Structure formats: structure tokens, C-alpha cells
Image (cartoon, rainbow, N blue to C red):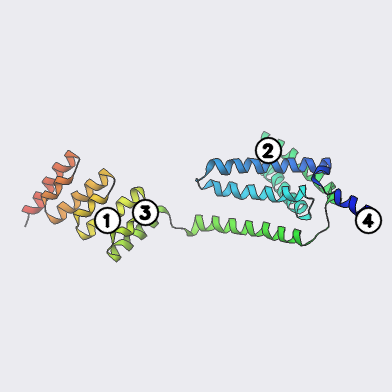
Amino acid sequence: MDENTNKTESYDVRDLPNELTFVAIILGIGASLWLFLTVTTYPNIDFMMYGWLFILYLIPLIGVLKRRRFGFYIGLFILLINCLAALVFFSAVSLIGLFINGLALVMLMKSMDHFRKWDRVDKWAIVLFIMINVLYFGAVHYWNYIRPTPEEYYQQVSAEAIEKGDWRVCERLSGVHRNNCISSFAKSKNDFELCKEISGDTIRDYCYFDIAISLKNPQICDNIKDEYDKDMCYGEAKNKEVVP
């Protein structure tokens, strides 16, 4: 009874052996670094990678503090990867990282007896760790190889708007792509009234310009703000008007 009680108390975080304390500090520093980069880079796409790395460090950190077997195995994996990365990206700084992570790796391996026996918690923690990695690399693959580029997406939406005969489909886009989508739609319908929905002056002027020439109607040129483009529009539209 007393022996079991002492054994249970020995798993308390406050009684963590010095070797595991060092390992927890290294994992904690890594988790803190990746958390900081996650917060500071959002909403840049890099935040997803940093968030993934934060979770990779957080899971073994919790495991080591709780002295769970999943913390031991995942911690070994993370520290080993860090050592290999330090060797691959060899530099003066990486030598320091290699020494620190190598030391933490040795201390963790020597502390195996301080961890609890394997149970269901460890199994599900390992499964969760694997699933997080699968989901992350699946997301990276989609983002880099399957997801359409902004230009491709603009072309898809623009074609859909023309096919459906509804310029409001372009509202799914933003910025320059939205303006270009509305401009393409207006030109396809020769509807100069739609040009006013364009927020960018340059794209809006060229929308009026092209439709005025297409319809051979110089009066549409009155809507152009740029005086030089307006004069060119008058000239082009009148020439088109005269030519049989």
C-alpha cells in the first residue's frame, strides 16, 4: 500500500528527476518558439507550419511532465530529428543545437525507468500524434499541388460568372481579381453600366474604353477619369464609328 502510494507520488511533476527536467526545458523552449512564430506570422501561410511544429513539441512535453510512455517515445523521435537536422544544415549554430539536443536525447534514454507502464492513454496519444502529422502533410500537399493558384481560381470564377450570366459570382474574389472578373464579364456582355462596380480606377477606365470601342459609342468614353485615356477612347471609338 505504502509502496504503491510512493510510486504514484514519484510521478508528480514536482518530483521530476533532473535529467527529465532538462529534457522538459528543451521541449518547452521549442514549443514556446514555435508558438511565438505561429502567433506573429498569422494569417501568413507559414503560421500553419509553425502551429504544426508547436503541437509536435507540446505533445511530448506533456508526456514527459506526466511521465507517460508516449512522452518518452515521441520525445526520442523529436530530439533525434533535431540532431539529424543539425547535421544536415551544418553550421556553428547547428553544432550548439546538436550538442543540446544530443544531450537531451541521452538523458531521456537513461530515464526510461522513470516513466509509467504503457497503457491506453499512451496508445491514443501516439495515434493522435500520427494523425496530426498525416493531416498536416495532407494539407501541405493540397496547398502546394492540388489547390488552384489565385490566378487559376480567378479564371475559374470569371468563366463561371459568364456562363451563369451573373456578375455577382465575381464577389467571391477580392482586390484586383474581383475587378478583372467584373471587367471581363462586362466586356463579354458589352454592358458598360457594370464597369461602375469596379473599385480600381485603371481597370474601370479600361472597362469603359474597351466597351466604347466594341460598341463604337464615343459617349461611353465620358465615364473615363484619366484624360489621356479618355482622349484616346474618343479617337478609337470615332474611328470605329466611321469605318464601314
Quadrant of the snapshot with the N terminus: bottom right
Amino acid under disc 2: Ser
The image's mark for residue 173 is 3
Amino acid under disc 4: Met
Earlier in the chain: of badge 1 and badge 2, it is: 2
Q: What is the spatial separation of the Cα atoms under label 4 and label 1, in whole angstroms?
A: 81 Å
Residue 202 lies, with reference to residue 120, above or below; the image says above
Q: Specify the quadrant of the image occupied by residue 82.
A: top right
Residue 210 lies, with reference to residue 95, above or below; the image says below
Query: Measuring 37% from the left and 56% from the top, which residue is drawn there?
Result: 172
Q: Residue furthest bottom?
A: 164
Instruction: Give the residue at mark 2.
Output: 94
Instruction: Give the residue at mark 1.
Output: 184
Instruction: Give the residue at mark 4.
Output: 1
Query: Measuring 69% from the left and 61% from the top, which residue is drawn there?
Result: 127
Q: Are marks 4 and 3 in contact (CB under 8 Å)?
A: no
Q: Nearer the viewer, mark 4 or mark 1?
A: 4
> Viewer-proximal residue, 101 or 192?
192
What kind of element bears circle 2?
Answer: helix
